[in-house]
Image (cartoon, rainbow, N blue to C red):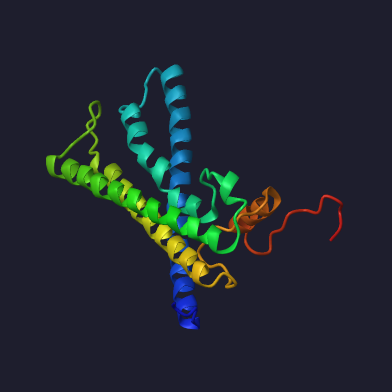
Amino acid sequence: MADDTLENRNLLARLNRGLIPIENLANLLAAFAIMALMILGVLQIVLRSVFNNPIDGYIDLVELSMASMAFLGAAYTQRVGSHIRMELLIGRLKGRALWTIEALGAALGMFIIGVLIYYSYGHFLRAYTLGDTTIDAEYVTWPSKLLVPIAFSIWWVRLALQSAGALRLVLHPGAAPIAVIVAKDVAEQAKDEIHEVMGAEADLPDPEGKS
C-alpha cells in the first residue's frame, strides 16, 4: 500500500493548481462565445428588420460557435461538481466506499472521453485535410472542430486528477481531499461559486444581518 507522503500530496496539489487556470480560461472563452452569439443575434435582427441587410453566413457562424459553447466549459464544470450527478446512492456513502465509487466513475469517464478525443480529432483532421467549409458562406470548419478534442483533452486530465485523488483517499480515508468533488449543500455550493468568481474575500451576506 502506497504511503500518503508529502511529496505525493504536493505533486497532486501542484497538478491540480496548474490545471485550474487552463479550465478557467476555457470556461471564459465559452462565456465570451455565448455573449458574442447573443450580440450577433441582436445585430442580425436589427439589420434584417430595419435595414433589410442581414449578416451573410449568420447560420454558419451559429453552427461554428456551438463547439466552443458546448464543450469548453466541461472541465471547469467537472471540477466544481456542477455536472448532473446521481447522488441518491452516492450521497449515503462514506469513507472508502464513497471514494471507490468516485474513482471508478472518474475512470469510466476517462475511457468515454478518451474515445471521444480519438474520434473528434479524426473529424478535425479530415476537415483540415479536405478543406471542409460550411454550406452557405463557406467558412472553414476545422478551427471549430479542433476545439472539440482540445476541450475533451482538458476534461480528460481533470478526470484523471479526480481519479488519482479518489484513489488516494481510498488508501488514506483520513487524508485531506485534493482534486476531488466534495459533496456540499446548496448554501455551501453557492458560497464557493461566489468565491470562485469574486475571490477569497467575497462572502455571502448574513440573512440575519450579523457579521
Above or below, 53 against 35 in this view is above
Q: Quadrant of residue 133?
A: top left
Q: Is residue 140 above or below residue 191?
A: above
Q: Quadrant of the C terminus?
A: bottom right
Q: Is 102 or 127 nearer to us in this picture?
A: 102
Residue drawn at x 37%, y 32% is: 62
Quadrant showing the N terminus: bottom left
Residue 73 visible here = no
Find residue 162 and report its horizontal and vertical position in percent.
46, 61
Rendered location of residue 187, percent (x, y): 70, 50
* 97 with respect to 57 (left or right): right
Q: Where residue 95 sits in the image (x, y, percent)? A: 58, 63
| Camera-nearest residue between 136 and 170 | 170
Total numbered labels placed on residues in the image: 0
Which residue occupies 30% across, 46% down?
A: 116
Image point (54%, 52%), residue name = 81
**Residue 154 shows up from this direction:** yes
The residue under the point 54% across, 59% down is 97
Q: Is residue 31 left or right of residue 64?
A: right
User: Which residue reaches farthest left?
Assistant: 130
Residue 167 horizontal/vertical position (percent): 46, 66
Q: Is residue 20 above or below residue 131?
A: below
Q: Between residue 142 and residue 165, name the one nearer to us.
A: 165
